[in-house]
Image (cartoon, rainbow, N blue to C red):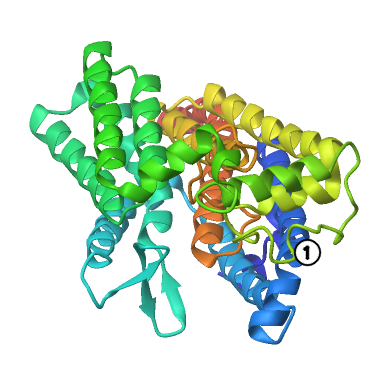
Amino acid sequence: MKLRSLIPLFDDSVSTWALEARLLRWLTFTWLFVGLIMLFSASYVVADVRQGDGLYYFKRQILWVFASLIGFNIIVNQPLQKIMGKSHWLLGLFLVLIFVTLIPGLGKKAFDAARWIALGPIPIQPSELIKPFLVLQSARLFGQWEKLTWRVRLTWLGIFGLVILGILAQPNLSTAALCGMTIWLIALAGGVPYKYLAGTAVGGVLLGLLSISIKEYQRKRVMSFLNPWADATGDGYQLVQSLLAVGSGKTWGAGFGMSQQKLFYLPIQDTDFIFAVFAEEFGFIGSIVLLTLLALFATLGLIVALKAKNPVHRLVAIGVTIVMTGQSLLHIGVATGALPTTGLPLPMFSYGGNSMIASLIGTALLIRVARESSEAEVVPLRRPQSANRRQRRRMF
């Protein structure tokens, strides 16, 4: 593979792709570009004060983007079957790393949660990196559900359960819930009997309630979400500041770079609450444009899923669409007070290399499904020709 071909903007094969694949590619690049611009604005002041360089976080994010785009272009040009043949090993690796984060001294803590492993200057967050591979393995399981033995089914269901329990133990309730809902919705789309789906849904809700009852800070977040103004300087502080940012944006916004809440009023404004800064600077109109972009992505994802002939490929497209749009809507819901405060990043907006890698791998998988679906439509037209040639050779 040539070095030039690893750079998405120089990929000469794009002109031969299906329309959905090309649209998804440019929609991904647009999403990424807007996210980088927003991160620059949200992180500059904080980086200048804390790191002595206003571009500190932005430059690190650019490096992660370059690395992620190389992986992105490799995936869109690799057969999906080949990628899926390796996905179970990567899922197993990240599952082990999730439990490594729980070991004192190895897991890196932030906000009372051990979610990272520090490999020198590079932080690894297994719960983020496992998402695309969780989608792939869920699609493989539920796309072939009727063909598999109960031994295989229960083995993979047990592995999925360990993933969710490991993330929940960090603790990271929001990511565990997102992973659980993604697996459940892929199973629903795969045609798994309702009696199994109902049982797992009840079990998931009970597990979430148990986590909230055990973890005091999670319980406080839920209570403060119901009325953040009751403790505006305590447990409700983050949400109150986020709501002030969103409300200050009004119709057209304060203008790019003009957010006031990012000046050390709104905590973690470059990750978990970056949408609040976006809403303050671009207002209601900008927020509607962003939601329209998400709606376009979801629509294209569903079109790709409907066109896919292979049931496993169809479920991969559905899973990626759920993760990308679902996580985005959950993030926006938290920033606007529609959901309890959680730590979910906004894909391709929030600062963090692990989230960037997972997001671009996910979109690359969706594009690959779109490419293979269009190529599958062409293959049957060529087969009769080759068959005719073989028949002519036999005749002579």
Residue under numbered circle 1 = 41
Residue farthest along the front direction in this orientation: 230
The quarter of the displayed image where residue 319 is located: top left
Question: Which element is circle 1 on?
Answer: helix
Left or right, 273 with reference to 109: right
Q: Amino acid at mark 1?
A: Ser
Residue density around tag 1, few if under 14, some if 14–19, many if 20 or more, within 10 Å: many
Q: Residue at x 43, y 48 (%)?
A: 132
Residue 81 visible? no
Q: Quadrant of the N terminus?
A: bottom right
Where residue 190 sits, quadrant-wise, is: top left
Q: Give how far across and how far down residue 277 sits, in percent.
A: 74, 53
Q: Nearer the viewer, residue 239 or 146?
A: 239
Q: Nearer the viewer, residue 295 or 238?
A: 238
Residue at screen point 43% across, 55% down: 128
Which quadrant holds the C terminus? top left
**Disc count in the image?**
1
Taking 51 as reference, is 377 left or right? left
- Residue 203, image x, y percentages: 22, 27
Position in image of residue 287 (x %, y %): 77, 38
Residue 273 sits above or below residue 18 on the image: below
Task: Tell me if 269 is positioned left or right of 174 in this view.
Answer: right
Q: Is residue 392 visible?
A: yes
For image coordinates 67% across by 66% down, the residue present is 7
Query: Residue visible at 24% across and 64% down?
Result: 102
